[in-house]
Amino acid sequence: MRKNLIALSVAAFVGGLGMAGSATASVIGGAPATADSESVRQSGTGHQLIVPYFNTQVGNATLFNIVNTDVTNGKAVKIRFRGASNSDDVFDFTLLMSPGDVWTANISQGPNGVSRLTTVDKSCTLPAVVSGSDFVTARLPQTLTGDALATQTREGYIEVFNMADINPGTALFTAVKHVAGTPPCSTNAAGLAALNALQGNPTTTAAANAIGLFNPTTGLMANWTIVNVPKSGSATGEATAITATVAATRTPGVGNIVFFPQIGGAAPTPDLFTADPSFRTVAGAAAGQVSNGAGAAFGGTVPMIAAQFFDLPDLSTPYLLTTPGTVATDPGTYVTLLQKALATSSVTNEFLTDTTINAFTDWTFSSPTRRYGVVVDYRPLTASPAGPALRAFDAGNIFWDATNTSVTGFQVCTTTGGVTFRDREETTAAGSSFVISPNPPTPAFSLCGEVSVLTFNSAGSSVLGAAVARTNFSTIAGSTVIRDGWAVVSLPGATGVGLPLVGKSFSSAATGTFNLGGSWEHRYVPTFP
């Protein structure tokens, strides 16, 4: 799937981010930024990457590699792991890559059941040590405890952002550039000073350049592998690449500097830098309108979550050229460009569940931009008296609203247009009522969670061992028995323009001597040119 999106130019952002020296926070546009459109590919290199799935359930570990194919410039890269239920941040840090660098990590289940990242890679990170760190549960529903809480860290997806290039000739470049296989980082006074400078929040091009940060170019790619040693199985995939491009030439361009320091503390004016309704307030038209609930616990100017510096950037942070003189816009408008590039009216793929070869199939559906259309407000879960979790919408989004979403437990579920499935001999059937484990049957087939896993014809074993947002789907009803074939899931969205998502089909089979497996990208029907 490849789509070019000729962008509406992202504006002279709230009074002049396009002019050096006039910015008021950490999105720095204007020259030398050149990108005014985006290209999205299911594989390739880009300015930003989406790794659509990680899993540390039932003996699984996820191996994750990031490659900087730029052999001239380093990269200041933000890495964020989000949970499968509602895209909550469960782990993030900053990676400082040298030219031509490769960074690798292993995400597995720690002794306490929480996902843990380990790495022997020597590339610089902020904080300096991330290996051995457990994922964080602070943003998850705090009514969960024990393994129920830990489970929420064991599946999800990964966001990767090139916040800024690190150019040769700067102290920061010297600190992160490998020397005899190891970067100096904080091993000397100059390197320590260069890294400490990244605790600041540069607001102009000159200030960013002074600490070694320059407008970001393309060149990042990533691959991932889910390995289960006890089962002798694996599943692989590539990151979806988002490239900031020049519309006139359709070539990779130079983006805005979107650097935010890897520190705590209240992020300045988050309404200007994220469309995430949980961080936003009810604001005027210039900054976008957000409906964040009603009643005593909602509304007003107090966001659900007070955004910290480390919460930014995200996929809605404006990355394209800010052009003085154009109509002002906001992060919701910007992220709609990406959502349109990912939007599809249906997905099609194959499934294999032949019992004679002990076959299983899982489909994944990752919705990495849903966070910017609808989020779950957990505050009612702990209120007195406790109430149900509620939805909050970004009023400007065109994909999710009250008509096509609901809350089951504390997960947002998005209704589909149903499923049609066929076998290899032209037998066909359609279904609309299936069991969403562990909940009772619902009247319509929904994708629950930000990363939903559809398991065919098995309430027990599956390829991925998913547990956070798994749907058990049966193609066997009465006299209709379809073990192998292909299926189409219709995705009209709230306004008939589809839904932004990516995913794959994963199949496995055991023949007694061999364990076999394969994975195939979904086939999409784009809804925007």
Image (cartoon, rainbow, N blue to C red):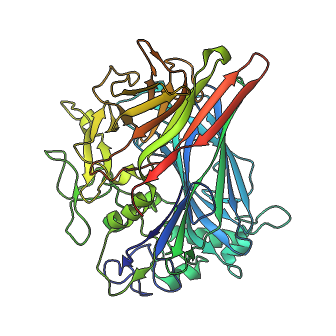
As drawn, the residue found furthest toward the left would be: 295
Q: x and y percent of residue 331 in the render?
A: 35, 66
Q: Is residue 394 left or right of residue 251?
A: left
Asked which quadrant contains residue 479, the reply is top left
Q: Residue at x 60, y 39 (%)?
A: 116
Left or right of 293: which side holds 27?
Answer: right
Question: Looking at this view, is 327 or 510 the one in front?
Answer: 510
The percent coordinates of residue 453 (x first, y second) are 48, 33
Q: Position of residue 181 (x, y in %)?
A: 83, 61
Seen from the viewer's position, the closer of residues 421 and 411 is 421
- Examine the rendering and report whether any part of residue 200 can be seen: yes
Can residue 269 be spotted in the picture? no
- Look at 31% across and 31% down and name the residue there: 408
Relative to 430, is 76 above or below? below
Specify the farthest residue to the front.
Answer: 426
With respect to residue 324, does 305 lie above or below? above
Q: Nearer the viewer, residue 4 or 29?
A: 4
Q: Is residue 209 left or right of residue 436?
A: right
Q: Residue at x 35, y 55 (%)?
A: 276
- Expressed as whole percent of the image width and height from the top left, the position of residue 380 reads 24, 37
Pick the front one: 189 or 455: 455
- In the picture, the quarter occupied by the C terminus is bottom left
**Number of numbered markers:** 0
- Position of residue 35 relative to residue 103, above or below, is below
Location of the N terminus (image quadrant): bottom right
- Residue that appears at 36% across and 27% down: 431
Residue furthest toward the top? 478
